[in-house]
Image: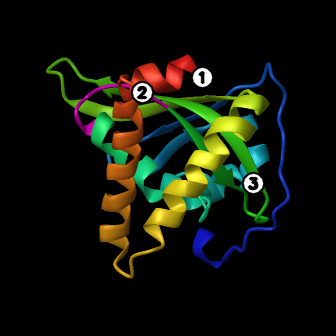
Amino acid sequence: MASNIQPTGKELFFERDEIIVSKTNPKGHITYANDVFMRLAGYSEREILGAPHSIIRHPHMPRCIFKLLWDTLKSKKEIFAYVMNMSATGDHYWVLAHVTPTFDGEGNVTSYHSNRRLPNRKTLDEIIIPLYKQLLDEEQKYPNKKEGMQKSFEMLTNLIDEKGKTYDEFILSL
């Protein structure tokens, strides 16, 4: 579905006290979405349940951020990440996502739970948007998407290393 949608450049907003919530199976297919998620994404419950979470992936998001997200989740750790999502209309909205794995009694991941809040606008404008543009520009230098993602991932890790922080420390310090 999302691959046919073209970005409009129009930004959507939600209230500071609203939380976007979704839950996926271990493969990333949506098993739950709250009303705020569906309203911003522009999909009905019938359309969204069972769909891959990437249905709301904005094409201007650096792929390396999703690599980092999935690498972290596969290591059974939580992650915070700034993400620009795209609605069914092509409009976009920014979130600060907190994604956590859910475990069964034997420690196996059974699902992922994501709470998304309204990010700080100054942080977006001054740090995240310029950083993501750099990462996306790096990715697009390479005709091979996988190579581009790897190069932008290296760029991201180098930038964070230069700050003397871990990714978590960097994100939580913003």
Picture coordinates of residue 125, whole percent (x, y): 74, 40
Picture coordinates of residue 59, whole percent (x, y): 59, 65
Q: Which residue is mark 3?
A: 92
Return the residue found at the far left: 106
Magenta stretch bounds: 74-80
Three-letter amino acid code at disc 1? Leu
Q: Which residue is mark 1?
A: 174
Q: Residues within 10 Å of mark 2 (few under 14, many from 20)?
A: few
Point 45% across, 74% down: residue? 141
Relative vertical location of residue 23 with respect to residue 134 in this rendering, above or below: above
Q: In the rendered structure, which disc, 2 or 3, sits on the residue that comes first in sequence?
A: 3
Q: What label does residue 115 carry, if any?
A: none
Three-letter amino acid code at disc 3? His
Mark whose residue sits in front, 3 or 1: 1
25 vs 156, nearest the viewer: 156
Mark whose residue sits in front, 2 or 3: 2
Point 54% across, 56% down: residue? 134
Mark 3 vs mark 1, CA separation in Å? 22 Å
The reply to whether the C-beta atoms of the residues labelled 2 and 3 are less than 8 Å apart is: no
Q: In the rendered structure, which disc, 3 or 1, sits on the residue that comes first in sequence?
A: 3
Q: Is residue 61 visible?
A: yes
Q: Quadrant of residue 17?
A: top right
Left or right of 29 on screen, residue 102: left
Q: Please check the rendered image and state whether residue 92 is part of the magenta-colored stretch, yes or no.
A: no
Q: Quadrant of the C terminus?
A: top right
The reply to whether the C-beta atoms of the residues labelled 3 and 1 are less than 8 Å apart is: no
Q: Which residue is mark 2?
A: 163
